Image: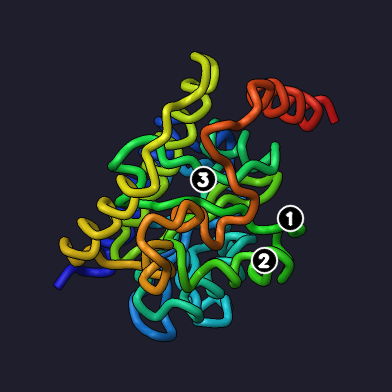
């Protein structure tokens, strides 16, 4: 059995990874791990996730109340969002929130990741929806995220960032990596004339492969079990605005414009 101290070290390692990969800046982002139904470890507020040591990590209960924290450290201000994930998804053991550059750009532009462009993304994520904007540190974000938790293991946060979760800390982190890689490829392929999407039949076959592999977690493929095979909307079900192979060529321009507008405020 892994000790609590070792789990704290793992949280620090993941924090360093998201910082080194440019998924967070300054003191952004937060990470948590479930120890039991009423005991959780989480990163503190107001510190860089790239320079943490085990002594930084706080312990809280299911309501986000402090069980133990060293002097000078308080739990993440976004702990409510983490606790909502654990409440709605008993299978989840870890949650990662970050601001990866490309995924966050799509979140700022209000564009969900819906285009099936590569097998790995289809199998691992399906599509990635956008939860409505909420004021940080309030119940608005947990409430916005809640509607997607039963069908997705990753979600974009409007004008904010991305959230991923899984049955282990490393799996939750890998989901975040996958979301950012998906967003980056989609963004770049649009600049090369637009991606050539996988067909609905190809997506259906990939979903079947996922089911055969018995991969853990939630996935939009599970919502398609009762859909007619080849249904073009199957990949995007539950993801809001639907993108297709005829997405307008000015989409990249829209993303860039909206990102610049946000940065200039």
| Percent x, y of residue 124 | 32, 51
Total number of numbered discs in the rendering? 3
Point out the tag, 2 or 1, that comes first from the N-terminus.
1
Q: Quadrant of residue 73?
A: bottom right
Q: Please, is residue 166 above or below residue 65 in the view?
A: above
Q: State if disc 1 and disc 3 touch (CB < 8 Å).
A: no
Q: Residue at x 68, y 28 (%)?
A: 255
Classify 10 Å Cα crowding around label 1: few (below 14), some (14-19), many (20 and above): some
Q: Position of residue 199 (x, y in %)?
A: 38, 41
Q: Which residue is mark 2?
A: 144
| Mark 2 vs mark 1, CA separation in Å | 7 Å
Q: Quadrant of the N terminus?
A: bottom left
Q: Is residue 139 visible?
A: yes
Q: Is residue 201 left or right of residue 196?
A: left
Horizontal and vertical percent position of residue 170: 28, 54
Kindly identify which residue carries mark 3.
Answer: 114
Up-down: is 4 above or below 197? below
* Closer to the camera in the image, 19 or 224: 224
Of tags 3 and 1, the one toward the viewer is: 3
Which residue bears the numbered disc 1? 133
Label 1, secondary structure: give it. loop
Which residue shows up at 33% across the image and 36% down it?
Answer: 118
Dot 2 and dot 1 residues touching (CB under 8 Å): yes
Q: Residue at x 54, y 16 (%)?
A: 191
């Amino acid at each position: 059995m892994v000790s609590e101290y070792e789990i704290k070290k793992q949280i620090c390692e993941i924090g360093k990874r998201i910082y080194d990969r440019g998924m967070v800046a300054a003191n952004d982002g937060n990470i948590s791990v479930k120890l039991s139904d009423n005991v959780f470890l989480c990163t503190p507020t107001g510190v860089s996730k790239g320079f943490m040591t085990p002594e930084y990590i706080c312990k809280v209960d299911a309501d986000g109340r402090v069980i133990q924290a060293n002097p000078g450290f308080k739990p993440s201000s976004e702990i409510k969002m983490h606790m909502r994930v654990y409440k709605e998804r008993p299978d989840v053991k870890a949650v990662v929130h970050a601001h990866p550059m490309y995924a966050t750009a799509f979140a700022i532009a209000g564009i969900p990741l819906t285009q099936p462009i590569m097998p790995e993304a289809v199998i691992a994520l399906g599509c990635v929806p956008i939860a409505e904007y909420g004021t940080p540190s309030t119940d608005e974000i947990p409430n916005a995220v809640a509607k997607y938790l039963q069908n997705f293991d990753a979600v974009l946060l409007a004008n904010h960032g991305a959230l991923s979760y899984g049955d282990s800390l490393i799996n939750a982190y890998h989901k975040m990596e996958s979301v950012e890689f998906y967003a980056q490829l989609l963004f770049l392929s649009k600049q090369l004339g637009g991606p050539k999407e996988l067909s609905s039949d190809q997506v259906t076959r990939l979903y079947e492969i996922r089911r055969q592999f018995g991969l853990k977690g939630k996935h939009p493929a599970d919502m398609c079990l009762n859909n007619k095979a080849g249904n073009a909307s199957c990949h995007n079900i539950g993801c809001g605005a639907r993108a297709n192979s005829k997405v307008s060529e000015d989409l990249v321009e829209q993303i860039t414009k909206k990102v610049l507008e946000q940065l200039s405020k």
